[in-house]
Image (cartoon, rainbow, N blue to C red):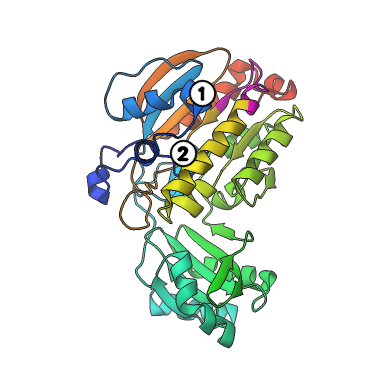
């Protein structure tokens, strides 16, 4: 999961103010020298062509398509849940500021007083309120265009266990909000730094393909923030990560064990560090880093394995604002020598159905898992 790696505006993008957005396409336009040989080998250019309604060449290896989201919204939780088979007809609630009754309920439950309660980016809010937080000890409450309730606190002022307790209390009272996010930071005034100890507290999703796999005895392993996004539902083991690089290291380490089951990984830096901050150069460099890793990883894929590379939404760093962008997402498949164009697919649920088909009883799923198919 390349978080936010969209390939062109979705059919309904105009309803979200995103007609014309194209995360990977615009990055390539701004950075024509960008070297992505392995992504191009598996069909990156074909994905961009498909999204634009143009003829697409068969990739050198694997299969390629693009998918349009059916769920309402363009946030992380919605995209991931649909990939796992859940379509949301109504979007999660968003706010410019949280209602007084909600804030008071959280403050009473957690025993705190908040400052902030505004819409802001993660860096701007620290510049505005970081010093006041350190002086008063009051956590910073803020949101964004996504359905998130975020609570920021300096790790030396509010220890991590305490911050997580506050967020758990907020989760109980943040009705309809997709995620409550702990946003710890460190540093001094003028040089605040968000740490890698972020933790998401999501709503529990309806039953997904992850639950179906677990119920069938097929282990599901979450890498990165996957367990957070699904509130642990359907996840047997979880490996939180601190960066894209760390995530790729964990993927390869677990992959090399040869154990069967589903490995579901999210590489979040594309979105968190570069998309939201509209950092084209940083996003481009992150893509090159992933592409270099992908070249080595592809050498370890066996014929019986299934590898799917996709995204959950867009976050065009050339776009206005700091919000996600409503885009089609690529779907690259590497499996058993397949080599074709999948086309323009309606719904992210294609991924859930593909996983189900791979592990279904007709494919002798238990035998596949025990044999180490992934």
Image quarter hosting the C terminus: top right
Label 2 belongs to which residue? Answer: 311
> Would you say 252 lies left or right of 136 here?
right
Camera sees residue 141 = no
> Would you say 19 lies left or right of 5 here?
left
297 in the magenta segment = yes
Which residue is found at the position 51% from the left and 38% from the top?
Answer: 287
Label 1 belongs to which residue? Answer: 333
Range of the magenta residues? Answer: 296-307
Which residue is found at the position 64% from the left and 27% from the top?
Answer: 296
* Dominant secondary-structure state across the stretch colored magenta: loop
**Badge 1: few (under 14), some or many (20 or more) residues near its Cα, within 10 Å?**
many
Q: Residue 237, image x and y in percent?
A: 70, 44
Element marked by disc 2: loop
Quadrant position of residue 117: bottom left
Residues 332 and 218: in front is 332
Tell me if residue 333 comes above or below residue 15 in the rendering.
above
Residues 276 and 180: in front is 276
């Amino acid at each position: 999961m390349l978080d936010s790696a969209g390939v062109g505006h979705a059919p309904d993008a105009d309803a979200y103010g995103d007609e014309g957005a194209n995360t990977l396409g615009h990055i390539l336009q701004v950075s024509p020298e960008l070297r992505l040989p392995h992504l191009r080998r598996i069909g990156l250019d074909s994905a961009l062509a498909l999204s634009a309604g143009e003829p697409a060449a068969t990739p050198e290896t694997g299969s390629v398509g693009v998918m349009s989201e059916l769920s309402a919204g363009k946030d992380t939780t919605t995209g991931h849940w649909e990939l796992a088979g859940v379509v949301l007809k109504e979007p999660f609630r968003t706010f410019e500021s949280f209602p007084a009754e909600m804030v008071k309920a959280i403050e009473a439950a957690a025993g705190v007083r908040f400052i902030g309660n505004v819409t802001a980016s993660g860096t701007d809010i620290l510049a505005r309120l970081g010093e006041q937080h350190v002086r008063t000890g009051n956590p910073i409450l803020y949101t964004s265009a996504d359905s998130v309730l975020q609570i920021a606190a300096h790790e030396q002022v509010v220890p991590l266990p305490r911050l997580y307790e506050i967020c758990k209390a907020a989760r109980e009272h943040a009705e309809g909000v997709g995620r409550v996010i702990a946003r710890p930071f460190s540093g001094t005034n003028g040089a605040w730094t968000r740490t890698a100890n972020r933790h998401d507290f999501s709503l529990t999703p309806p039953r997904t393909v992850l639950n179906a796999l677990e119920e069938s005895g097929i282990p599901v392993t979450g890498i990165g923030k996957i367990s957070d996004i699904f509130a642990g539902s359907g996840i047997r083991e979880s490996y939180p990560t601190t960066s894209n690089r760390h995530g790729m290291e964990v993927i390869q380490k677990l992959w090399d064990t040869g154990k069967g089951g589903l490995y579901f990984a999210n590489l979040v830096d594309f979105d968190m560090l570069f998309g939201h901050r509209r950092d084209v150069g940083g996003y481009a460099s992150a893509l090159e880093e992933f592409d270099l890793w992908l070249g080595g990883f592809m050498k370890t894929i066996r014929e019986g394995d299934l590898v799917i590379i996709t995204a959950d939404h867009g976050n065009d760093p050339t776009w206005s604002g700091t919000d996600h962008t409503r885009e089609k997402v690529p779907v690259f498949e590497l499996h058993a020598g397949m080599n074709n164009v999948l086309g323009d697919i309606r719904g992210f649920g294609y991924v859930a159905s593909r996983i189900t088909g791979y592990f279904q009883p007709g494919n002798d799923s238990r035998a596949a898992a025990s044999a180490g198919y992934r």
